[in-house]
């Protein structure tokens, strides 16, 4: 084989390994569209949103207009994009803020996916087009105060009463809870775990926002209270009859996190690199010192390695080869890597690293939630360990 004649391209700090050339033109176009939106709409405002613990509701319609809500689903106003394209969108959204990516992820990969995968045709027609447009917001009620990593222990119950269902229970840590138009609520029944679509104006359904958060502040997090909520039979998701229903939705959301964590890490690396070249100490930029260059090199290594892992999982998903265990490895590795990058970048920035003038402390705090939700790092470690050994240690 003859040696290549073209010279290798120059090193680009923001794409050290040249991963960009592994993407198709369409994937790059989608990536660039979301990146521009985040740069123009999110980055200038998100520090204020984080400080004020709010996210503007009009953002949902703007994201819908871009085709990002349920973008990986087919039909009903959804874009039908590839898994890889959806992942790239999640990466760029979380480079802005985890709360913005969470809004898209909960809407599309949890609430909309549950309806798309497990709902009736009537339910799909009623909700999915409006949710894809951002005209209706959904939330996903699975986690409870005493049933997070063990959803099979949920205490929320649903019982038949004639043709109706009566729901009673409590859900906790629910993104979009108090601003949602419909809640996908999972409950234990005599027939197994079933899912229900609960319009949020239904009698007996109330919410309470969770305050005093120091993480994911630019995101609505709520408690759902279900006090004998009466629903017609048409509210039941007919195709979901076990924990497989909600767990399939969680796997979709975890896949988005694999990509999203890379975005948060990349934003921290970029902030640290820029700061290190501008900060002058002892007559030269700190970027000229060995200690800081080592930090930058290790951060770049983690960001590029995490990007390649996410891209590989995306290609596997598009080919129908992705298993939940693969997603667990991706979430475990990429979120932990992103936390390391954020903490290192925080040190590079010194005292400035703790202010909202820079994105680092915001991403660092957000990642402390990301490493826990949709399965803690410990649980994902056990999922991978179980796949390696054939022994389920947490059962």
Image (spheres, grey):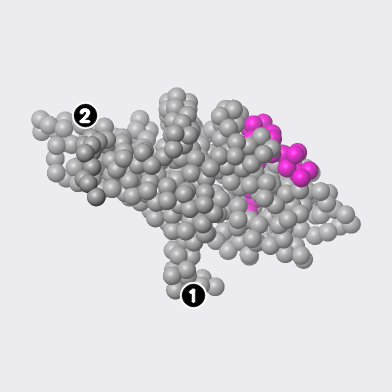
Q: How many C-alpha atoms fall within 10 Å of the one at disc 1: few (<14), some, or many (≥20)? A: few
Q: Is residue 164 left or right of residue 275?
A: right
Q: Is residue 130 magenta?
A: yes
Residue 53 position (above or below residue 328):
above
User: Disc 1 on helix, strand or loop?
Assistant: loop
- Which residue corresponds to mark 2? 278
Judge left or right: residue 69 versus residue 169. Answer: left
Query: Residue drawn at (76%, 58%), measured in percent from left and top?
Result: 158
Residue at image x 68%, y 55%?
186
Residue 155 in the image: above or below residue 334: below
Q: Position of residue 133 (x, y in %)?
A: 64, 31
374 vs 388: above or below: above
Nearest to the observer: residue 28 or residue 390: 28
Q: Which mark is residue 391?
A: 1
Residue 59: give x, y in percent of width and height.
56, 29
Q: Is residue 214 magenta?
A: no
* CB atoms of marks 2 and 1 within 8 Å: no
Position of residue 171 measured from the top left corner of the image (x, y, whole percent) = 64, 52
Asked if residue 223 can be seen in this view, the reply is no
Residue 200 place in picture, x, y as percent: 72, 41
Nearer to us in this view, 185 or 385: 385
User: Which range of residues does the magenta coloring cover?
Assistant: 121-144
User: Of callouts 2 and 1, which one flags the residue occurring earlier in the amino acid sequence?
Assistant: 2
The residue at the point 44 percent across, 73 percent down is: 389
Q: Residues within 10 Å of mark 2 (few under 14, many from 20)?
A: few
């Amino acid at each position: 084989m003859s040696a290549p004649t073209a010279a290798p391209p120059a090193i680009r700090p923001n794409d050290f390994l040249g991963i960009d050339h592994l993407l198709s033109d369409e994937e790059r176009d989608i990536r660039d569209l979301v990146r521009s939106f985040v740069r123009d709409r999110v980055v200038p405002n998100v520090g204020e949103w984080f400080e004020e613990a709010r996210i503007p509701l009009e953002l949902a319609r703007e994201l819908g207009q871009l085709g990002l809500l349920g973008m990986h689903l087919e039909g009903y106003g959804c874009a039908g994009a590839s898994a890889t394209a959806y992942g790239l969108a999640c990466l760029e959204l979380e480079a802005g803020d985890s709360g913005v990516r969470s809004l898209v992820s909960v809407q599309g990969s949890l609430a909309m996916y549950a309806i798309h995968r497990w709902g009736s045709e009537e339910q799909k027609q009623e909700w999915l087009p409006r949710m894809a447009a951002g005209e209706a917001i959904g939330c996903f009620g699975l986690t409870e105060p005493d049933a997070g990593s063990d959803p099979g222990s949920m205490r929320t119950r649903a019982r038949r009463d004639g043709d109706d269902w009566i729901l009673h229970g409590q859900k906790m840590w629910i993104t979009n809870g108090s601003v949602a138009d419909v809640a996908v609520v999972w409950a234990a029944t005599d027939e197994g775990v079933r899912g229900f679509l609960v319009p949020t104006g239904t009698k007996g359904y109330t919410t309470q926002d969770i305050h005093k958060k120091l993480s994911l502040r630019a995101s609505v997090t709520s408690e759902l209270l279900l006090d004998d909520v009466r629903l017609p039979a048409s509210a039941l998701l007919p195709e979901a009859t076990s924990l497989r229903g909600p767990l399939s939705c969680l796997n979709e959301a975890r896949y988005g996190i694999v990509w999203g964590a890379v975005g948060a890490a990349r934003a921290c690396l970029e902030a640290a690199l820029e700061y290190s070249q501008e900060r002058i100490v002892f007559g030269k930029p700190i970027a000229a010192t060995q200690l800081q260059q080592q930090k930058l090199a290790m951060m770049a290594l983690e960001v590029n390695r995490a990007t390649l892992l996410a891209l590989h999982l995306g290609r596997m998903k598009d080919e129908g080869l992705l298993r939940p265990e693969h997603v667990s490895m991706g979430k475990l590795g990429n979120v932990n890597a992103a936390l390391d990058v954020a903490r290192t970048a925080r040190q590079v920035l010194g005292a400035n690293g703790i202010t909202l003038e820079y994105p680092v402390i915001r991403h660092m705090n957000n990642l402390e939630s990301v490493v826990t939700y949709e399965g803690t790092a410990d649980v994902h470690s056990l999922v991978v360990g179980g796949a390696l050994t054939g022994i389920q240690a947490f059962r």
